[in-house]
Amino acid sequence: MVPMQGTIKFYGGEPTVASDNLLWAMRRLRELGFRGWFTIFSNGVLADRVIKLLEADDRTDVVLNYSILHGEDAEPIPSDSLAKLKDFAALHPNRIYSSHAGVFPFGRGVEFATQVGQAHINERMQTSMAKKIEAGQLNRAAVDKAAERGFRICPRCRPVVGTDGRHHACPFAVESQMPHFDLGPVSDPSEQVLARYQRFLDWINNVLEPEAEALQRHPCVVCANSLSRLPQPS
């Protein structure tokens, strides 16, 4: 199920809490022929572990949580950890990045519209959509249709594998145990998992987004608060 090129992303909780297991996974994927990049999303607090992971594989980068990095609405990275990360970044360009703050109204950012205004969302989303058009992932008509709906659209993120050994359809809702997101255990044949994911995408089109439009709410809010009354993908 893993293409030999591309990027595999490790999310949390905090991945460096189990850094030995993470390092094993990275090495195992390399043994199996993966030639792309690993991206680790981290709070940066355990800086020594972050650096150890970066040093272990030269096609690995780290994305630091914006709020924790800058101490905005969160406890900041300890000063000694931040100093170590800055020193590493100075010697190894393009290996440590910072994520954006509240760019998209997804996940925990579902109150973004009320905080910054719909016009700001339209501007930010149009910028992102332009990049997808350039990459051939979207056409102008699809973007115009999304804009008419105030960009109340599901971002259709790639599925993830949880530490429970199961495929989960949405990284933003990975804590949810609702059966709508369950794509089956890692022991299942890849064809079965991919077929379930296609059914999930069809469910977004045919059930989730129409419900979000009817309620005039973002699909992430519907998934967070109203999923129990929606039928499962079938």
Image (spheres, rainbow, N blue to C red):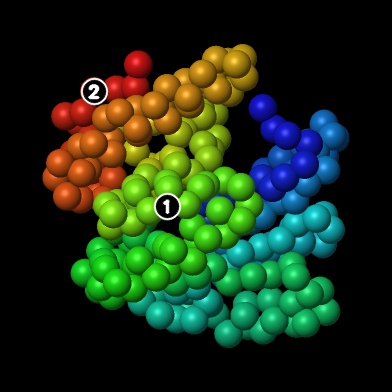
Check disc 2 and report the residue beneath it.
231
* Residue 103 position within the rendered picture, expressed as x and y whole percent measured from the top left: 43, 67
Which is more toward the observer, 51 or 58?
58
Q: Earlier in the sequence, mark 1 or mark 2?
A: 1
Which is more toward the observer, 92 or 163?
92
Which is more toward the observer, 161 or 133?
133
Q: Secondary structure at mark 2?
A: loop
Inspect this view and state whether residue 129 appears. Answer: yes
The answer to the question of whether label 1 and label 2 lie on touching residues, with beta carbons closer than 8 A, is: no
- What amino acid type should be assigned to the residue bearing mark 1? Val
Quadrant in which the N terminus is drawn: top right
* Residue 105 position within the rendered picture, expressed as x and y whole percent measured from the top left: 34, 60
Mark 2 surroundings within 10 Å by alpha-carbon count, few (fewer than 14), some (14 through 19), many (20 or more): few
Quadrant in which the C terminus is drawn: top left
Q: Secondary structure at mark 1?
A: helix
3D distance between C-alphas at marks 1 and 2:
28 Å
Q: Is residue 38 left or right of residue 9?
A: right
Which circle marks residue 143 in the picture?
1
* Residue 230 position within the rendered picture, expressed as x and y whole percent measured from the top left: 21, 28
Q: Quadrant of residue 89?
A: bottom right
Q: Is residue 27 left or right of residue 99?
A: right
* Residue 83 position within the rendered picture, expressed as x and y whole percent measured from the top left: 67, 84
Is residue 45 shown above or below 181?
below
- What amino acid type should be assigned to the residue bearing mark 2? Pro
User: Residue at image x 39%, y 26%?
Assistant: 202
User: Residue at image x 35%, y 51%?
Assistant: 146
